[in-house]
Image (spheres, rainbow, N blue to C red):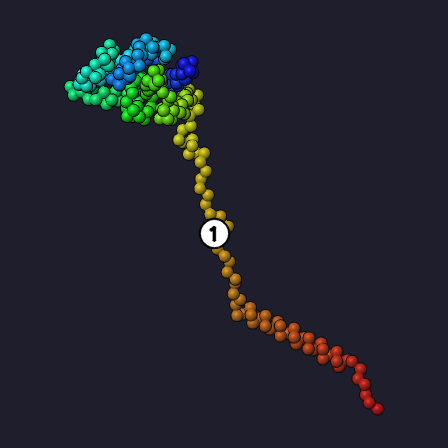
Amino acid sequence: MKIRRQKQAKKTLGFYRHSFGFREPFQVLLDGTFCQAALRNKIQIREQLPGYLAGATQLCTTRCVLKELESLGKELYGAKLIAQRFQARSCSHFKDPVSGSACLLSMVEGGNPHHYFIATQDQELATKVKKRAGVPLLFIIQNTMVLDKPSGKSIASAQAMQTQQLIPEHQKLSIAQLKEEHNLVKTSEARKRKRKKAGGPNPLSCLKKKKKTQETPQLSATKKKGTRKRKKRKLEAITGAVQLAPQNVET
């Protein structure tokens, strides 16, 4: 079971290394609940955590966490002694301290630029941490420290960065410069020349239809005279033929 947990932790660390740039020494921010759980379960954080993460580790906390442990009194006195052994990172609440959970959330704002791990047993804080991309979460379960799997927010953010950053920015600039040097960049004028002009209407469809010429009265009169003459000639030919035919005379 221990080997399986270490393999899972190695896989999760590889994800944060490649996707969000985490490097050794790993910086782990601890709150009072994690220190109290480690004390109850007899876990030596300083000795066991570097072995679990398989790398150098810097354990740290904030002034707000220490103030909160002091205000809670004797019940968390042992947790306060453990937290005091770690480095106290400066936060933006020097004059007006806030709760430990609110302070740790403020330390990972803006995409977690300092690559902090958050170690806590506070379920409400853990839920808020999972809604932020690139923030590894540590907790204690069954006397063992566990590195939580990447949240859906972290996975989605990593996929988006991979699609947007397939080519680094400096390489994009060098490619653009090379295109300009070799005249491979198409200017706007060349693009305008290649564009097809909008076709006009068909010229044949614009021609006016020819109107039928009306016959003048003179032409119509001559046509009528011609037809009359032809009819008259036919009648004369018929009557002539009748006269030439032999007639039967009764005796």
> Which residue is at the front of the view, 10 or 170?
10
Name the residue rendered at 32%, 18% in the picture: 139
Residue at the limit of the structure toward the right, as seen here = 251
Name the residue rendered at 66%, 76% in the picture: 232
For the C terminus, which image quadrant? bottom right
Q: Is residue 23 above or below residue 222?
A: above
Q: Determine if residue 113 is in view.
A: no
Element marked by disc 1? helix
Q: Quadrant of residue 111?
A: top left
Please give left or right for residue 103 compared with residue 249 in the image. left
Q: What residue is shown with label 1?
A: 206
Residue 50 percent location from the top left of the image: 34, 10
- Give, as a three-letter code, the residue at label 1: Cys
Label 1 Cα neighbours within 10 Å, binned few <14 / some 14-19 / many ≥20: few
Q: Quadrant of residue 134?
A: top left
For the N terminus, which image quadrant? top left
